[in-house]
Amino acid sequence: MATVTRVPRTSVVLSDRKARLMATPFRHVDLVLLGSTIAVAFLGVLMIYSSTQPRLAAEHIDQLYFVKRQVAAILVGIGLMVGVMAIDYRKLRDLGPLFYGATVLGLLAVLSPLGHATKGAQARFPLPGGFELQPSEFAKFALIVALAAYLSQHRGDLDAWRIAVTLTLALIPIGLVLLQPDLGTDLVLVVILLGLLTVSGVKARHLVVLLLLAATAVGAVVQLGVLKRYQVDRLTSFLHQGQNTKGATYNVNQSKIAIANGHLTGKGFHKGTQTRLGFVPEQHTDFIFTVVGEELGFAGGATLLALFALIMWRTWRTAALAGDMFGTLVCVGVLAMLGFQVFENVGMTMGIMPVTGIPLPWMSYGGSAVMAYFMCIGLVLNVHMRRFT
């Protein structure tokens, strides 16, 4: 008599779950890109703690005040990233107009009495618990998706009219951000626009004209009084760093001293003298790289830049592997954003670039920026996961 072997029901259930897991696009997640991104974000938490703890302790405030908010933003950002990854990026292309419209409405609303003015710019909505929401940071994500959708639809047929439509789509949020005013974010949006146009097949002569127009526009903004006097002084301070060391060039000079103090291996975590004594203003936001330079030295700074290089390389690799033009353009837009922000922010702290207020991705304190960066990485991971379909 034949013996019937009975397979336990639990084994069948586990096999079914394993089969579904193997079939899901999440099986193809780029773990190198994901791990590098999270590593940079939590290194940022350590640097934020080191740069804010002495001041908060002296003021008898919760010494983890900024750390708790940054960690909360990271966790929410990771959740948003997973949400972006869960939706097929080709469906996100169809949602491009919705993202774009919501962003424009947000930028309009923040300029109304609903918005809150901070440090000379009306760019944030106040939220309960001391949190703030900055629509211009999410404009980067929306602009990448909307422009990539439009340009991929008209690939090979980008005549003067369609270029004009692309410029109009970009100039509406750029103009609204300029009214805040926030020239740094506008520069990032312009770089995203130029990066997408370059890869989408725009003719070289058109790109040259656009670059000249962009340079002229930046010069006009600086000269025509759109920015406040202190903002102009900050932008041009890197050109005369030895002058007025207690005024406009103070930040840059103190930043360079902090980085130089780190030498090869740094003074050690939480042991930087410039950092603990609070000589570098805005150190936990725009000048966070100075904490890395002073406390972790050249080795730490080089490691951080290597992580950023790894993130950008994996983004470029995903652009090359993408199954369609929309996926390629989405990755190029994210790459242009990250490359410009890292170069500008680190260069600013070293005195070779103007001080524009552009944060260092995932490192600088700021909830809206952190969440927007995770959403953008979610786009890249999304394209990588579905490169075979």
Image (spheres, grey):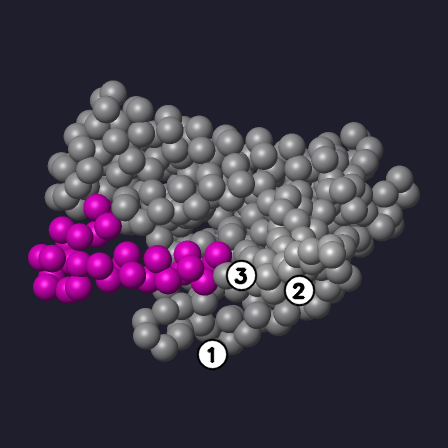
By secondary structure, the bulk of the magenta-drawn segment is best described as helix
Sequence-wise, the earlier of marks 1 and 3 is: 3
> Where 87 sits versus 186, above or below?
below
State the CA–CA distance, disc 2 to disc 1.
23 Å
Please tell me whether residue 72 is drawn above or below residue 242 in the rendered image.
below
- The image shows residue 134 at horizontal and vertical percentages of 47, 63
The residues bearing labels 3 and 2 have C-alpha atoms spaced at a distance of 14 Å
Magenta residues span 49-78
Q: What number is the disc on residue 80?
A: 3
Q: Residue at x 51, y 44 (%)?
A: 34
Residue 269 figure quarter: top left
Q: Is residue 89 visible?
A: no
Q: Which residue is mark 2?
A: 99
| Mark number displayed over residue 239 | none
Mark 1, Cα crowd under 10 Å, few <14 / some 14-19 / many 20+, is few
Q: Is residue 142 left or right of residue 274?
A: right
